[in-house]
Image: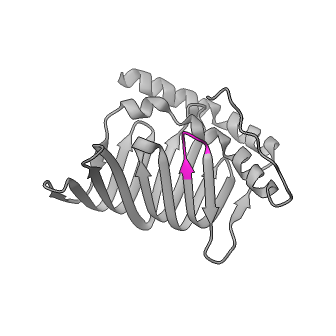
Amino acid sequence: MSMYKPSIKLNSRSWPLLFTLLAFAPLSQAAQSDFDQEVVIQAKRQATDLKNKVASYLDDVKITQGTLTMTADVVRVVNDPATESKSYQAKGNPAKFSQRLDDGKLIEIQAKEITYTPANNTLQIKGDARVSQEGSMVRGDIITYNMLTEQLTAESLDDTVTTILQPEKKQAKDTEAKQPEKQQQQNEQEKEQ
């Protein structure tokens, strides 16, 4: 968490963006322990180009790393030779991404295409893109979210981005209802270790 807060000048057009950022601010608290765990990729078929460092996983693909889960019809894992970093390019109808955050909240993402780049903490989703958490949702054609800087941008080809925000009382009730589930998951994780 940064000690410096950015200064934002608001006008009447800024309010929807402000509410969207406030609603999804907890996204930055992604379970950091997830990134210390192994990546498991399951698929019905696999094709790998060792020379170009590209692996393709086909049919019922599921990728897990801790609480992070990605499912899709096809996933290409591309290794950048210059930086040795990977990107995961998932396509499906829809492709899905979810992660349980440190505070126990679940973020769910779906679109026709999801590109996850762990090295720069970004998710770019395209084609009927949706990001939801605790009943609040942002929907557009292209959504980019940087988990490190907490910046979310959404755009739509027909000039309409939809944002649905739940009242704080409903979010608080949903969180309280999920507390026993979170405790059970923590107990299960401790048993596995």
Report the quarter where the N terminus lies: top right
Residue placed most toward the observer, 10 or 132: 10
- Residue drawn 58% across and 41% down? 149
Give coordinates of residue 112: x percent, y percent: 46, 67
Task: Return the residue found at the far right.
Answer: 12
Q: Would you say 143 lies left or right of 80 here?
A: right
As for residue 146 lying within the magenta part, the answer is yes
- Residue drawn 36% across and 21% down? 193
Residue placed most toward the observer, 179 or 103: 103
- Residue drawn 68% across and 74% down? 159
As for residue 29 lying within the magenta part, the answer is no
**Where, by quadrant of the figure, is residue 103 drawn?**
top right
- Residue drawn 62% across and 57% down? 153
- Color style of the picture: one colour
Give coordinates of residue 119: x percent, y percent: 40, 42
**Where, by quadrant of the figure, is residue 13 drawn?**
bottom right
Give coordinates of residue 88: x percent, y percent: 36, 53
- Residue 65 vs 136, above or below: the answer is above
**Where, by quadrant of the figure, is residue 114 drawn?**
bottom left
Q: Which residues are magenta?
A: 145-150
Task: Return the residue found at the far bottom.
Answer: 158
Q: Would you say 125 lies left or right of 24 here?
A: left
Give coordinates of residue 150: x percent, y percent: 61, 43
Dominant SS in magenta: loop
Q: Would you say 137 lies left or right of 113 here?
A: right
- Residue 97 vs 127, above or below: the answer is above
